[in-house]
Image (tube, coloured by chain):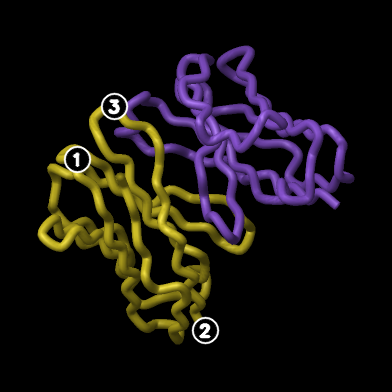
Chain colours: A purple, B yellow
Amino acid sequence: DAGVIQSPRHEVTEMGQEVTLRCKPISGHNSLFWYRQTMMRGLELLIYFNNNVPIDDSGMPEDRFSAKMPNASFSTLKIQPSEPRDSAVYFCASSGDRAMNTEAFFGQGTRLTVV
Amino acid sequence: AQKVTQAQTEISVVEKEDVTLDCVYETRDTTYYLFWYKQPPSGELVFLIRRNSFDEQNEISGRYSWNFQKSTSSFNFTITASQVVDSAVYFCALVSGAGSYQLTFGKGTKLSVIP
């Protein structure tokens, strides 16, 4: 299996622009997570999907952030409009078990820079 | 509330030395899972181990070993005969409560192995 695939690996955009991050989870996994990593806050959960349904989006920082999972093999995280404070590494992870008693596998991350 | 503390921010060792990374966790749940992830300079998060709260057996995998002690709420990670390729940031994480899914990460320990 190719693992969790994220694209793009790096994204540089200007403040105010729309940014879309993409994720392909591991085939057969029914749980998908978006995490954000910053120096100040470390790794924090943004949103969790189970069977393509958003279960917990309490970590989404504000309305500028939205996430979708139209099918079991694809998810997007969109920021519109982007701001410099959104600069971070965004990770997608998938897991084969809702209860997380199996490990979550992470993608390589998307490093977002908003200038 | 759940919390993971990695008190060591940075550690430097000379190649072939043994090194232990500390992890202390807090939870009121009796069912929980503990994890270690490795983040090499390339940025991805690599799963290393998962341990559930009912299994206090220590584990060894090659040069890696883990010591889980519920009495001190610790889940320490030891690398024996360290190598330069072990240089990375190591994260300890916790999922707490039956049915839970959110990984709570520590701040990470940056390990530098000097040749």
The structure residue drawn at horizontal position 55% and vertical position 41%, both measured from the top left corner, is: A35
Q: Look at the image and tell me whether residue B88 can be seen.
A: yes
The kind of residue on which mark 2 rests is Ile
Kindly identify which residue carries mark 2: B114
Kindly identify which residue carries mark 3: B99
Which of labels 3 and 2 is toward the front? 3
The kind of residue on which mark 1 rests is Asp
Say whether marks 1 and 2 touch (CB < 8 Å): no
Q: Is residue A1 left or right of residue B8?
A: right
The structure residue drawn at horizontal position 31% and vertical position 68%, both measured from the top left corner, is: B22
Kindly identify which residue carries mark 1: B29
Q: Residue B53: image x %, image y %?
A: 18, 44
Q: Residue A23: image x %, image y %?
A: 64, 30
Helix, strand or loop under label 2: strand
Q: Residue B38: image x %, image y %?
A: 47, 57
Q: What's the distance in space between the residues labelled 3 and 1, CA to CA?
A: 11 Å
Image mark for residue A51: none
Q: Quadrant of residue B97?
A: top left
The kind of residue on which mark 3 rests is Gly
Q: Give the quarter of the figure containing the N terminus of chain B.
A: top left
